[in-house]
Image (cartoon, helix red, strand yellow):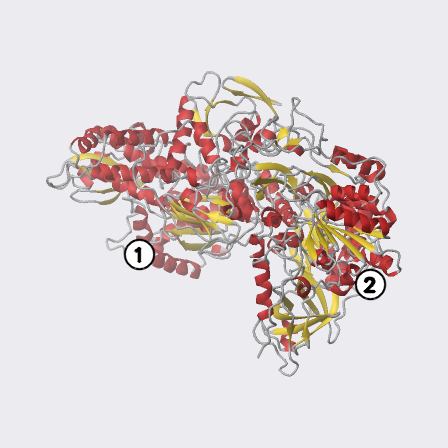
Amino acid sequence: MITIYIENQPYAVEADDRNLLAVCLSLGFDLPYFCWHPALHSVGACRQCAVKLFKDEHDRQGRLIMACMTPVKDGLRISLQDPEAVAFRAGVIEWLMVNHPHDCPVCDEGGECHLQDMTVMTGHVHRRYRFTKRTHRNQELGPFLHHEMNRCIQCYRCVRFYRDYAGGRDFDVLGWHDDVYFGRHTDGVLENEFSGNLVEVCPTGVFTDKTMKRHPVRKWDLQTAPSVCVHCSLGCNTLAGERYGTLRRILARYHQSVNGYFLCDRGRYGYEFVNSPRRIRQPVVRGADGAQQAASPAAAMARAAGIIAGGRVIGIGSPRGSLEGNYALQQLVGPDRFFHGVSDRELGLVRLMLAIERQGPAPLASLREAGESDAIFVLGEDVTNTAPMLALAVRQAVGHKATALAAQKRIHPWESLAVRDAAQQAKGFCFIASADQTKLDDIAAAMYRGTPDDLVRLGFAVAHALDASAPGVSDLSPDMASLARRVANGLLAGQRPLVVSGTGLASAALLQAAANVAWALTKAGRPAKLCFAVPECNSVGTALFEGGGLESALAALRQGAADTVIILENDLYRHLPAAVAAELLAAPHVVVLDHLATATTAAAEVVLPAATFAEGSGTLVNNEGRAQRFFQVYVPDGDIRESWRWLAELMAAAGRAPAEPWPNLDAILAALSAAVPVFEGLREVAPLAEFRMDGQKIPRQPLRYSGRTALTGNRDVHEPKPSDDVDTPLAFSMEGQPGHPPPALISRYWAPGWNSVQALNKFQQEVGGPLQGETAGRRLLATASASAPAPAYFTAVPPAFVARAGAWLFIPAYYIFGSEPLSLQAAGVAQRVPRPYVQVNDSDAERQGWVEGQEVAVVIGDAVQRLSVRRSAHLPSGVAALPAGLSGRPWLPLPGWGTISSEAPAVLIMGRSDRFFPGAERVNVPKATGTVTGSAPEETIMRIAAEPPPPPVGGASSPASPRAPEVPP
Amino acid sequence: MERPLTQHIRPDREPLTLREYEQVGGYQAARRALQAAPREVTEQVLKSNLRGRGGGGFLTGQKWSLVPPDDHNGPKYLVINADEMEPGTMKDRWLLEGQPHQLLEGVLLSAYAIQARVAYIFLRWDYKLAARRLQQALAEAYGQRLLGANILGTPFSLDVHVHTSAGRYMCGEETGLLNALEGRRPTPRSRPPFAVTCGLWGRPTAINNVETLCCVPHIVQRGGEWFRALSRSPDDGGTKIYGASGRLRKPGLWELPLGTTAREILMEHAGGLADGYRFRGLLPGGASTDFLVEQHLDVKLDFASVEKAGSRLGTGTMVVLDDRTCPVGLVLNLMQFFARESCGWCTPCREGLPWLARTLQALEDGAGTSADLDVLDAHVRAIRPGHTFCALAPGAMEPLGSALKYFRPDFERHVADRRCPWRAG
């Protein structure tokens, strides 16, 4: 510890690598700033954090310094209250206000604007500037961000985040003197996957949430709750805000070990599926005429209970449903009749990952640990598109090389300009082995492109190069062998190596190869970690339950062991070939609980409207085994309730009630944690419902929440009593103790004088560090000990890939916007979805005589698609890539073999789309003409994505009648 | 009186060829120095008390001594700041156009002193003629193995590149220059680290002005003591190219002993003010220095004396204000320059200077108020070294602050008369 003096008072602070601004803020002082950001560090541009520095206690003169650019050292003596410092800070605001418009009343940032806060903090009230303000043209930046450059105060944070932190290239600082412009060289969609963070990084209203602009609300009118992102497996923490019964926006919720300060754009903008016109808000039952009709909860319950009471029931769970929902279903049907809502292959991959973790000695890395690693091997997973924030972490990890080099020149890690000047382009070791180019290629020391099997072989070869006792790869080419040696040396040079892989290529051997590499590294004395991207937000959590996958469910049905299927929050058409899904749904009785109308709900006898993450509380387990609680944001209209509540009611109605009833979330958590050992810690994930602060609940609504008495005045002049929340310590109200709750319960960041997201500083133990109070969430998997006995290496090395004449190995190409089904229902995300295509290697295309954009027929199994050709210089020969998960496209067992032909197929089969999406029609292609002209099918798909069909009345009652098929001339 | 730097420059500035330069003793210093230890060059320069001629006045030998001699992890660089954009300053142009080989020999010696293998001449965009002549001289020097690999048969190698700037004042600020050279925006860098340890591409780099390096061959050839004795000031060695512009009989550039007084330059060399004009003040070293007035005319124009008088020697090329020119208009002209040339990085400079320029314009247009004078004063108080990221904005305050000090009644008359007293009507 060292002592520094502020206003002549001694303060003991850690003698570490921090700057004076961070220290002052950590000590609780209100010192204004703009250009500094705890994740972006110091650049000294705004001059807002000026304080007076004194040589010693006799120095009365002192001089102004910028706190953010000053290292703390013992005996440092400063004053924040010094009149010259106070006047200078007010003067800086006055300068910033020279060109800042006085448009707070119509600005979306108003009420949570850092510039407003800092203006008030400095006491600046009167502007002497009396000349014209400079004005800018704004840019159209795509569906996520609204641009209002006149508000800019040139803090340079946006460009530093976008380019330096997130690796974006299509955004920059342009112009000069008082005409500095932050934008693209011309209007256009911001390409970077993390662009939405500009909303929070910008200290004022230059970049605001465009999706929120479509349903605007003042920030102080939002009812908010802590939540967890459902759009990938990383479990980033979010703050979800609601007004008038619709979800209005998502902000990042700080979690030091998970997402830190940021979110990806899928996580930030995918939320609009909650407001989708496709939402199921009322129960639906199939009438005697075979059509689905809206029903009352009681009627639906009676119908479902009748089915269950008499039937041989199996349950199909959900990898995106909560632990509680899956557990309730398992209890309803019985553990031996519970099946996971994923294919056996996918379930096997996740369980393999869990087995690798269990065996140790290379544990699964948190996002923070991934970001702290210093040598990285990305093996076969396109993390930018399957687990985006992991890509952001990897990008930060390679930056540690620069801070380490700078440290040799006695440059502090927070001096970001000096670090860059000293280290220049230096990056830590990152090797990327992938089938196609990735968005991380720019930070890679080297890359390898290969077929899935060849990626696996490289992985095994690297492990063998690290440890000769790991199985080698026979008939390895000398080039590959030397590449493997190079990767091994690069990883060995690190002190904290990380192996990144995932289930994207659906290859167990790939995970095994990754495990071998990590284990070989630990054997060489490096504390290696593993990080696997898995398919969905609760893939890991549900894989911890017993039971087989969908193929097992189908077998049970085929054997006659079941005649009734209850499906939890799942669209089987996204997990199975259409014919197989249809067979499962052809069971005599099908009950589905879900949020959105899908082809699966369309086939159900009873559909129950399930709560999304915003309308119910529950627990998800992320890719490193961290269980985290999401909290209900608001009480929805209609009959929507949590799946576990529906199932509990159903159990009671069907006479299968659990021994202990589940009146609330804590009760089912208690049952689950008692029943399954791995879930023992579930009750510690977040404070239980009885938790109180000063005897009070924690309000979801801020003190300034307006219109409480008028919100429902159109229906009833009486102010309604706020709904009770029996599940959590949060209240649907302004009443309660808004202070500093435990991190798991933080609904918003606010402190006196700090209305923007920067109020977060006041919730951290110290700026940039962990939150005050017990860490939110809990890691369920026992961290493998480094001293654990070395596990036996995996030995199944596949043979080298051999291209097949006349056939292609199709692999999935993932898209951050397009491959995840829920976010596809968000209007903004839908605008970013790629058009369907098939991608092949340049030389392959050359051989086939295919030009870019040419239409070909792609046949995989019984699915035939007409797609336009894209050529790639990167994809291996003999391999073809298809975008994964696009709406309106059939599910395909990828990777898998199939054919591509220039000849037209007899019938264009649109997979599930013709079953459900009324906009996508079956197109009959006459054999005689041989070709389809134009690209009508693709345009159809895009229209579906952009404009969902009208809401199903009372659920998916009847598919709209298909339009006349388009028959080409 | 000796004029080592300019004695061989022809009146028409047609440059000396390599052969002509060698005939007047050129490259002899280099031939000798390359046979000796690099440190000996630095020793002579230290003895000479040569101070940087770009405006900073840092001891050149001391700067070179800070370049770590034992850092062999990568290249070291010499960067020649030839981005002469200070208003009223054209001294380096004279040297560049008139005798490019003198600079190249200085570059060779200086690079040898710090053991840099690559040198960049960062040249002002407008200096097209200088660029051609430098390229010509480089070709000659490479041809005679005075540059390139194994110079004059020694193990020392040096490559010299001419980099033409895109033309911004900030590119002449030495760290902005480094960023520009690296292909970045020419915003300044934070210091520390200093360029001598962490400069171009993160490597040790000495950055010197053209005139400074032109002194080096003479120092090496005739000794540091000799060079030091050329000066009239004990702390500063050598001669200095002084300049004077304004309403003078003979405005121009003169190589004179360092420490020559302003009066001598104005009266003897520039021939005094033009007929009908009276002296009111001068900016001694370009636009970003404080005014000196009548009482300062006998101050020796060396680094220490000028500072004692409340200004800075800067580039040593003075701008003279006469009684028929509006001081507010002069400061407005400079402020518009500084506001335009601000890089936009830090708030006081980016927002403050345009505000000042508009305020001064209002005064000139007769739309000024007494509150405007308060705004001017407040900026002079607030924008000081350390309060801004680099020296540009504090430099811009020097003519403004000193004008408010010495010519305040003129500012007040603009307000009281609601017009510029120097404007007709």
Q: Quadrant of residue A487?
A: bottom right
Residue A154 is left or right of residue A334, and the answer is left
Q: Nearer the viewer, residue A323 or B79?
A: A323
The chain identifier of the residue carrying mark 1 reads: B
- Amino acid type shown at disc 1: Pro
Q: Is residue B335 above or below residue B293?
A: below
Q: Which residue is mark 1?
A: B15
Q: Is residue A356 visible?
A: no
- Counting from the top left corner in percent of width and height, residue A515 is at 79, 50
Residue A914 is left or right of residue B219, and the answer is right
Q: Could you tell me which secondary element the residue under label 2 belongs to?
A: loop
Q: Which residue is mark 2?
A: A474
Residue A695 is left or right of residue A457, and the answer is left
- Amino acid type shown at disc 2: Ser
Q: Are marks 1 and 2 in contact (CB under 8 Å)?
A: no
- Counting from the top left corner in percent of width and height, residue B225 is at 37, 37
Q: Is residue A428 above or below residue A947?
A: above
- Counting from the top left corner in percent of width and height, residue A934 is at 56, 73
Q: Residue furthest top?
A: A58
Taking the spot 32% from the left edge, 35% from the top edge, the residue there is A129
Query: Considering the image in quadrants, where does the N terminus of chain B appear?
Result: top left
Looking at the image, how many numbered discs can be counted on the residues? Answer: 2
Q: Is residue A843 above or below residue A394?
A: below
Q: Is residue A935 visible?
A: yes
Q: Nearer the viewer, residue A969 or B88?
A: A969
Taking the spot 65% from the left edge, 60% from the top edge, the residue there is A886
The chain identifier of the residue carrying mark 2 reads: A
**Disc 1 packing (10 Å; few <14; some 14–19; many ≥20):** many
Q: Which mark is in front, 1 or 2?
A: 2
